Image (cartoon, helix red, strand yellow):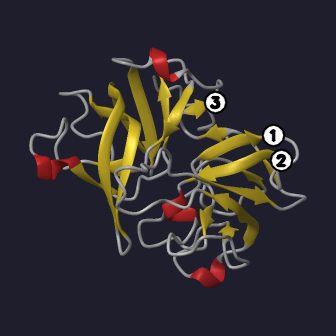
């Protein structure tokens, strides 16, 4: 499943200054010590303020969930430095899903946000050292499929466990949200002992043919959940 595409082109890594922006090489202003980065790129329909190919990530990473709209401080930075003074802004957040709190009758269905790169910066839909996107796959074909995600130079492999899981997700500082019909995965034991780690939100989830399925945004303490309390997972 790992194709090593792009490894020779980025021998020094992707978090130093890049003139061509790729998946994982830039971060939102709100980046914390877990070094969250953009996940991939999505094509947005004409007429939208970010029409074209736009960086894609989670609302809980790109945006402040305590707000209901975008403001001028929501920037995308590159290179990714420990000290904010070393970063340069390369774009800005343009839209995000404002997640609903604690309402099982009005569940959330997606945690996602999009940004826009500023001209004349260019991008390439590539994630070294593994994938070059091949389109996306329909949800109905996913049950039991072999899948993989890549984050922070780690490759995770597993299988789709459910394509319609209803679950509560705990968000730091802002409480719980109820989600409906999420795609859920588990590690492909014994070769891979876990599927995600803290800070991996936004990792692109793909099938064996490199078709995009979605973005990682949460993890459960046990999977499948064994007890009611285990059904409250955590945004990562």
231 on left or right of 83: left
Cα separation between marks 2 and 3:
19 Å
Chain-order first, disc 1 or disc 2: 1
Q: Please name the residue that numbered disc 1 is placed on.
A: 45
What label does residue 31 carry, if any? Answer: none
Q: Position of residue 32 (x, y in %)?
A: 46, 73
Residue at 42% x, 31% y: name it.
148
Chain-order first, disc 2 or disc 3: 2
Q: Quadrant of the C terminus?
A: bottom left
Residue at 73% x, 72% y: name it.
89
How many residues crowd mark 2 within 10 Å: few (<14), some (14–19), many (20+)?
few
212 on left or right of 70: left
What label does residue 51 carry, if any? Answer: 2
Residue at 46% x, 15% y: name it.
141
Q: Position of residue 33 (x, y in %)?
A: 42, 72
Position of residue 141 relative to residue 61, above or below, is: above
Cα separation between marks 3 and 1:
19 Å
What label does residue 133 carry, if any? Answer: 3
């Amino acid at each position: 499943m790992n194709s090593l595409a792009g490894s020779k082109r980025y021998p020094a890594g992707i978090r130093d200054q890049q003139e061509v922006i790729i998946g994982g090489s830039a971060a939102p202003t709100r980046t914390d010590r877990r070094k969250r980065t953009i996940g991939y790129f999505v094509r947005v329909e004409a007429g939208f303020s970010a029409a074209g190919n736009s960086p894609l990530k989670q609302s809980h990473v790109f945006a402040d969930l305590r707000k209901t709209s975008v403001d001028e401080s929501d920037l995308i930075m590159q290179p990714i430095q420990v000290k904010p003074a070393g970063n340069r802004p390369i774009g800005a957040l343009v839209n995000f899903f404002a997640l609903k709190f604690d309402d099982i009758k009005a569940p959330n269905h997606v945690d996602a946000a999009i940004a826009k790169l500023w001209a004349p910066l260019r991008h390439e839909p590539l994630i070294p050292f593994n994938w070059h996107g091949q389109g996306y796959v329909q949800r109905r074909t996913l049950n039991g499929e072999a899948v993989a995600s890549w984050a922070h130079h780690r490759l995770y492999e597993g299988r789709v466990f459910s394509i319609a899981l209803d679950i509560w997700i705990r968000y730091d500082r802002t409480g719980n949200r109820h989600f409906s019909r999420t795609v859920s995965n588990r590690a492909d034991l014994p070769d891979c002992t876990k599927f995600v780690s803290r800070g991996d939100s936004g990792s692109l989830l793909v099938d064996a043919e490199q078709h995009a399925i979605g973005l990682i945004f949460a993890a459960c303490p046990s999977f499948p959940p064994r007890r009611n309390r285990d059904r409250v997972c955590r945004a990562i």
